[in-house]
Image: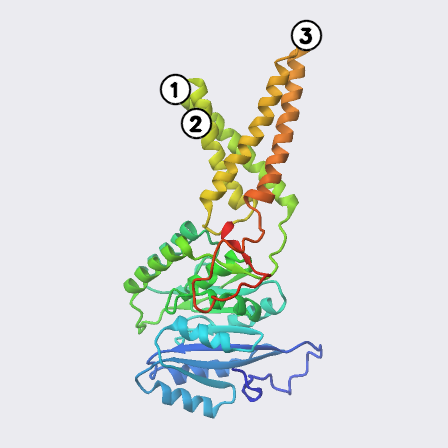
Amino acid sequence: MRHESSAWRQPETQTADTTIRPTTTVDLVVPVYNEEASLAASIETLLAVEPARGTEVTIIIADNASTDETPIIAATLAATHPQVEYVRLEQKGRGRALNQVWQASSADVVAYTDVDLATDIRVLDPMVEIIRSGLADVAIASRLQPGVAVERGIRREIISRCYNRLLKLSLGVGFSDAQCGFKALSARAAKELLPQVEDSEWFFDTELLARAEWAGYRIHEFGTDWRDDPDSSVDVVSTAWKDIKGIVRLRTGGRTRVSHAVPAPNTGAQILHFIDVGIISTVLYAVLFLLGIQFVSEPTANILALLLSTIANTALNRGHTFGVSSPHRRLTSQVKGLAAFGLCLAFTSAGLAVGDGFTGPWATVGTLAVLTAANLAATVVRFVLMRTWVFARGAHHSAHRATTPAAAGTANPNEKDIDHV
């Protein structure tokens, strides 16, 4: 995809910064479909923006089977400007265009912007820099960050915010704005994630980001000014319905394979979060028990309170302590969590049995000491079980087979199937 003559170069006259640094190549894709009215002006605007020093940018016009004069205009721009390339696809679909062009790219960073340039193009430089530095693998523009200036109608604003809240609830993701038309990712992330993305239209962005987060890639958001395109041809209602169907597909079977090394969790932070969750669970148990004895016997209330508080404990530890965001295999985690709790309950039951044998004036103190030790041991064992078994980050190679043609084939022995989380 990249040609030596098609780089967006920094003028050689700028010599203020004499620091030698590796040049980062960027392929900035502009997907278009029947954009004869705005394409030339948008590309000229992009060409007028000076990239950061040490960055070479190629603008790639990806034509999604346009039927107007877009192909002629795009070809002319590519012939006129060495920084511009033109790619023609015979099938519609923004996601399809981005997937194919990005996978064919040899650049260090791949990015895209919508042709309407609704997002401030100046956000490209910090995006590239944070990926180049290694502090993030994926960078996205967000219209929903505090303090940004966004110009769009109330209808689209409400739909956008509801959609992103739905993503958080259904897919367990943390990013704030899935559909803003300006994103960038490292070559490594693109190489791994793109073959797994099935959607070829507008849900492409959401699926890509969800898979990136589930696979452990770091996503950094840049709040950016944004203005709505009043001439946009996007059917919001139809697109929203397709997005909902995409969410269901990801929620029920969109598991992600990961071959890169996921950073090891911070044990100290996990211990503190585990304690936090333990305190919350204890309070919840007490409340449920006190409510339960108003309606059922104490043994029954105890069992119900323990069961419900244990389920809540596992769910909280899943996201808060062990940072699992994927929605898959939650039931498996709960079953394992109950098994771990059952083992720990055996510790305290054994301690209580030992304490029952104590006699004399110090019997109560002895029983309390034994139960304290048993509870401490049970807590340690439960934490270890959750870390190494319930929410383990190990490989499950045989648990899932790739469902997309691009991902099918012989499994890489270094790949991990993270659907177990």
Q: Residue furthest top?
A: 360
Report the Cα–Cα distance between label 3 and label 2: 35 Å
Residue drawn 68% across and 83% down?
15
Dot 1 falls on a residue whose secondary structure is: loop
Q: Are marks 2 and 1 in contact (CB under 8 Å)?
A: yes
Nearer-the-camera pick, 261 or 115:
261
Task: Identify residue for label 3.
Answer: 361
Dot 2 falls on a residue whose secondary structure is: helix
Nearer-the-camera pick, 349 or 68:
349
Task: Identify residue for label 2.
Answer: 304
- Residue type at mark 1? Val
User: Residue 289: percent from the left, percent from the top?
Assistant: 45, 24
Q: Quadrant of residue 42?
A: bottom left
Please determine whether, in this image, residue 97 is positioned above or below residue 384: below
User: Residue 255: percent from the left, percent from the top?
Assistant: 46, 56
User: Residue 168: percent from the left, percent from the top?
Assistant: 43, 52
